[in-house]
Image: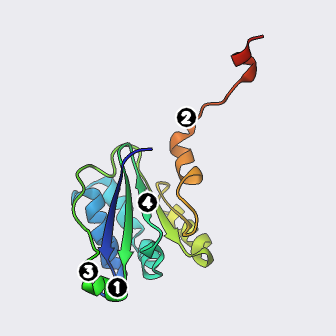
Amino acid sequence: MSTVASRTFKSTPERDASRTWVAIVDLLTQGKTSDARTELLAVAGVAASVIADQAPKDAAITVTCDGPRTRIYCLYDDDAVEGSDANEDVLGFDPLKGDWRVSLPCLADDLAWVQGALKKHSTRITARDLNAAVSSADEAATTKSQTLVFDPKGFLGS
């Protein structure tokens, strides 16, 4: 498994959900204008809805790429106002290097519509039940070509 970086953003009421998403996009794109930034901002309404539901409080927004994995959490209520647990520092690497993906945690009741809405704008940005780990479904697409299958006949010889 690769290295993991973690960041925690102040959200409501310190900043509204839309501004929280823009701050996250700024971190991920390192403030640069790019196709990735356009794609991330295209799902701003859906991402803001997930943030407003406080899904990323305990379940991370997970970003995978050809480098380290990035986990992003949000602080809410008094924790957001006080902000001592926040860490919005820039990353020392490009979190969208190569074949990147973003997995948003989502409340189970909203999962179907969130997935449908994201699909209209991006294949790289997906949603998962906030109780589900990021792994098989989200990483299968990026690691499919690297999957090894054990062939016992080939191993043991004919």
Query: What is the CA distance from the residue labelled 1 to the residue labelled 2?
Result: 41 Å
Q: Please give the residue where the numbered disc 4 appears in the rendered image.
A: 62
Mark 1 touching mark 2, by CB under 8 A?
Answer: no
Q: Nearer the viewer, mark 4 or mark 2?
A: 4
Using the image as rendered, state which of residue 119 and residue 107 is in the foreground. Answer: 107
Instruction: Tell me, yes or no, if residue 14 can be seen here.
Output: no
Q: Quadrant of residue 67?
A: top left
Instruction: Tell me, yes or no, if residue 146 can be seen here.
Output: yes
Q: Residues within 10 Å of mark 3 (few under 14, many from 20)?
A: some
Residue 95 x %, y %: 32, 52
Mark 1 touching mark 3, by CB under 8 A?
Answer: no
Mark 1 or 2, nearer chain start: 1
The disc at residue 44 is none
- The amino acid beneath tag 1 is Thr
SS for callout 4: strand
Residue 139 x %, y %: 53, 48
- The amino acid beneath tag 4 is Thr
Seen from this angle, which residue lies furthest right? 158
Q: Residues within 10 Å of mark 2 (few under 14, many from 20)?
A: few
SS for callout 3: loop
Q: Residues within 10 Å of mark 4 (few under 14, many from 20)?
A: many
Q: Nearer the viewer, mark 3 or mark 2?
A: 3
Q: Please give the residue where the numbered disc 3 appears in the rendered image.
A: 83
- Give the vertical position of 115 relative to 92 (above or below): below
| Residue at position x 25%, y 56% in the image | 91
- The amino acid beneath tag 2 is Ser
Left or right side of 62 for 84: left
The N terminus is located in which quarter?
top left
Q: Please give the residue where the numbered disc 1 appears in the rendered image.
A: 12
| Residue at position x 31%, y 83% in the image | 80
Mark 3 or 4, nearer chain start: 4
